[in-house]
Image: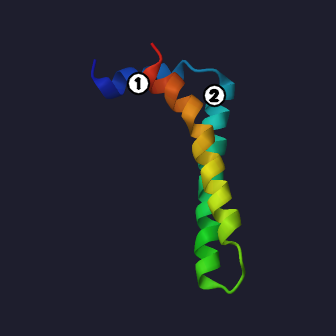
């Protein structure tokens, strides 16, 4: 079994809360990136809001990455 297959199986065995957190963090990252892109194309000051959403989503990814990839 390869490295990727092991990590995938480990991810499938996680609780619903961990999977939900991962999906929510990715959603927040996408929203933050969308806000940043919209701010660069419009004259509104949404840049800070976009960066905050991206930082929050990255902070939400830390426990999921630890549980899935690092913790044995």
Give x and y (percent) for residue 23: 62, 41
User: Residue at left 61%, top 70%?
Assistant: 36
Res 67 visible = yes
Q: Within 10 Å of the Cα at label 1, are there few (<14), some (14-19), or many (20+) other Cα atoms?
A: some
Query: In the rendered image, is residue 27 in sight?
Result: no
**Rendered position, 28 above or below 37:** above
In the image, what residue occupies the spot 54% across and 18% down?
13
Name the image quarter holding the N terminus.
top left
Helix, strand or loop status at disc 1:
helix
Q: Residue at x 67, y 34 (%)?
A: 20
Q: Position of residue 68 (x, y in %)?
A: 49, 25
- Label ID, residue 18: 2
Q: Residue 7 has which mark?
A: 1
Measured along the vertical axis of the image, is residue 56 above or below residue 1? below
Closer to the camera, 3 or 48?
48
Q: Give how far across and how far down residue 35 sits, in percent.
A: 65, 68
Q: Give the percent coordinates (x, y) of residue 44.
A: 72, 82
């Amino acid at each position: 079994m390869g490295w990727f297959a092991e990590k995938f199986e480990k991810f499938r065995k996680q609780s619903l809360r961990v999977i939900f957190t991962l999906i929510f963090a990715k959603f927040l990252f996408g929203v933050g990136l969308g806000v940043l892109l919209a701010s660069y194309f419009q004259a509104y000051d949404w840049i800070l809001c976009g960066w905050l959403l991206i930082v929050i989503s990255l902070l939400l990814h830390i426990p999921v990455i630890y549980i899935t990839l690092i913790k044995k």
